[in-house]
Amino acid sequence: GVLKVTSGEPGHFGDGDIGLLAEMAGFIADALANASDHGEENRRATHDRLTGLPNRELLTERLQRAVGRARRGGSGVGVFFIDLDGFKAVNDTHGHTIGDRVLCAVARELRSVLREGDTLARLGGDEFVLVCEGSKPDVAPAIRDRISDALARVADSDPRFGGLGASVGSAWSDGHRSAMELLAAADASMYRAKRASRSPR
């Protein structure tokens, strides 16, 4: 912030004026510092500290708003629940530091395939959720392909990340499902996908 006081008269401001302005500047500086601290505290409360992605709290808030808009306007909301496959093996073999690198790389690559207005969040552990507002179920294959491509880039970026993949579940709502129902449906879909990938062929 800048506090600027001018006068067209030479020597208009005396020592008393200067002292008062200095005191005002101090008050303003404190207020700006408090606002900055508050903004940082709010970000820490709503974002995952490791990846910088929205956390569960912010995801829930955004998903509720998206469902409300879908209910009013008839647009669809898609939720993709992403659970990493092979992450535990990387974490157990190479340690948590490498595991954290994997999670950050996954967050970065998934961000790169988002549309404007999409929300990508980390729920915790190796679970991520992608919310696609204004979309329909027929775009699911294309979105899954983008997710798979993003994870393939992570797996190819470091030999220690090899074998990394994901089980992805999805669910849609036109506003008739609540945010929590939609998230639960996508979670259940993800578990079905994970069980199917483990079943013998």
Image (cartoon, rainbow, N blue to C red):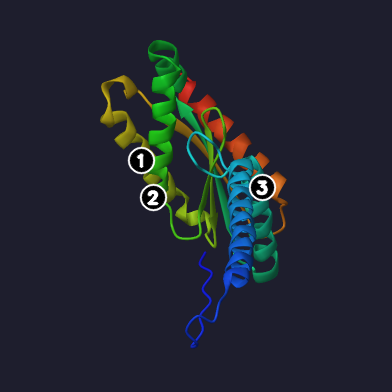
Q: Residue at x 61, y 36 (%)?
A: 187
Query: Which amino acid type corresponds to the residue marked 3 in the rendered image?
Result: Thr
Q: Residue at x 50, y 80 (%)?
A: 11
* First along the sequence among labels 1 and 2: 2
Question: Which sits in the foreground, 51 or 4?
Answer: 4
* Residue at disc 3, secondary structure: helix
* First along the sequence among labels 1 and 3: 3
Mark 2 — residue? 113
In the displayed image of the protein, which residue is found farthest to the bottom? 8
Tell whether label 3 touches label 1 (CB within 8 Å): no
5 horizontally vs 58: left or right: left
17 horizontally vs 159: left or right: right
**Which numbered tag is attached to residue 60?**
3
Could you say which quadrant of the image residue 12 lies in?
bottom right
* Residue at disc 1, secondary structure: helix
Question: Which sits in the foreground, 12 or 161?
Answer: 12
* Residue at disc 2, secondary structure: loop
117 horizontally vs 20: left or right: left
* First along the sequence among labels 3 and 2: 3
Residue 15 at what x, y percent from top left? 58, 69
For the residues labelled 1 and 3, the Cα–Cα distance comes to 24 Å
Mark 1 — residue? 150
Classed neighbour count for the residue bearing mark 1: other residues with Cα under 10 Å, few (<14), some (14–19), many (≥20): many
Q: Is residue 55 above or below residue 192?
A: below
For the residues labelled 1 and 2, the Cα–Cα distance comes to 8 Å
In the displayed image of the protein, which residue is found farthest to the top? 93
Tell whether label 2 touches label 1 (CB within 8 Å): yes
Residue 92 at what x, y percent from top left? 44, 12
In which quadrant of the rendered image does the C terminus lie?
top left
Residue 138 at what x, y percent from top left? 48, 55
- Marks 1 and 3: which is nearer the front? 3
